Amino acid sequence: MGAPEKYMIHNIDCLKFLETTPDESFDVCISSPPYNLGVRYSKYEDTRVDYIEWMKDVWSEVCRVLKPDGHLFLNLGYSKDNPFDTYKVAENVPWSLQNNIIWAKAVEVDGRVRGYSTPHSSKRYLQNGWEHLFHFTKNGDTPIDIEWSGVPYNEDYNNAERNAKRSGKTYRATTNCWHITYKSKATKQITKEIAGNNKHPAIYPETLVEKCLKVSGLKNGVVFDPFMGTGTTAVVAKHYGLDWVGCEIDEDYYKFANERIARTI
């Protein structure tokens, strides 16, 4: 088995691709797999009776192809019908959970945050305005890049921050609650803007990928996404000058992602 070709989305089932991928091929994996919510994508429906076992197989293989000091960022949503599936998937990842991050899905209109997610009229449920972002590392003790991802100390704020500045520290770790806005009137609008006619029901923001990369500290290496969708992970990796590899089984998304990546500077 040779090293996978870089700068390429493979139009193939990710497990088939992973079976031929050597150990320790990638530095970081950032991905948002299907949530098994019965959502209709372009060519397939997101419903599997073997979902948990399938996810277990995928993430076991992903951990195998990540380097020992690598990072896996796994974005998972919530199903009212199967509310514990998210945790079952996370529990079956063979690496250690190092950070449990919450993505608070804010909606931005005219430069101002107007709430979290879009309103709905359910008589039973509160609107779900957040998603999980699980950060796994091999043993749960891999260093993160505080300088790149953190918050600057303010030496005039309190004694703790003044002492940190005096000892040479300039940044402290950010929180595990990330308020990331959709810069549009509604999620549907950004889906339309990004994906055009190849509408994808679950596009995550580029900012989410950026923050993951900054936590990992990756400045030179390969980013992998086994569920590339419309190419967001590759777009951000390319923007930061990183190598990238991905898989996308849906031919429409595969074609659109390649077009989108080609337009990225």
Image (spheres, rainbow, N blue to C red):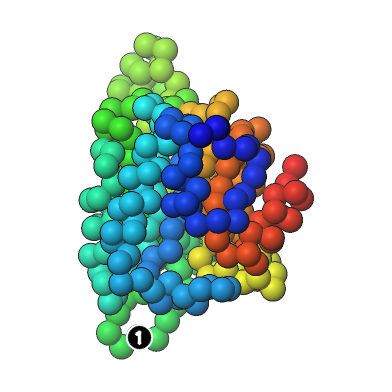
- Disc tally is 1
> At 45% from the left edge and 68% from the top edge, which residue is drawn?
117
The structure residue drawn at horizontal position 33% and vertical position 52%, both measured from the top left corner, is 57
Q: Residue 52: horizontal and vertical position, in percent?
A: 28, 61
182 or 51: nearer the viewer:
51
Mark yes or no: residue 175 visible. Answer: no
| 196 to 231, vertically: above or below | below
- State the residue lying farthest toward the front: 1
157 or 38: nearer the viewer:
38
Q: Where residue 144 sits in the image (x, y, percent)?
A: 39, 28
Q: Would you place residue 226 above or below residue 68 in this image? A: below
The residue lying toward the viewer, choosing from 35 and 3, is 3
Provide residue 183's location: percent of width, then percent of height: 60, 60
Going by the image, does 76 lie left or right of 152? left
Q: Could you tell me the amino acid type at mark 1? A: Ser
Q: Residue at x 58, y 73 (%)?
A: 42
Q: Position of residue 172 (x, y in %)?
A: 38, 28
> Which secondary structure, mark 1?
loop
Q: Is residue 196 visible?
A: yes
Residue identifier under label 1: 122
Check the image and report above or below for 4 versus 188: above
Q: Local crowd at mark 1 within 10 Å, few (<14), some, or many (≥20)?
A: few
Q: Residue at x 53, y 38 (%)?
A: 223
- The image quadrant where one finds the C terminus is top right
The residue positioned farthest toward the top in the image shown: 167
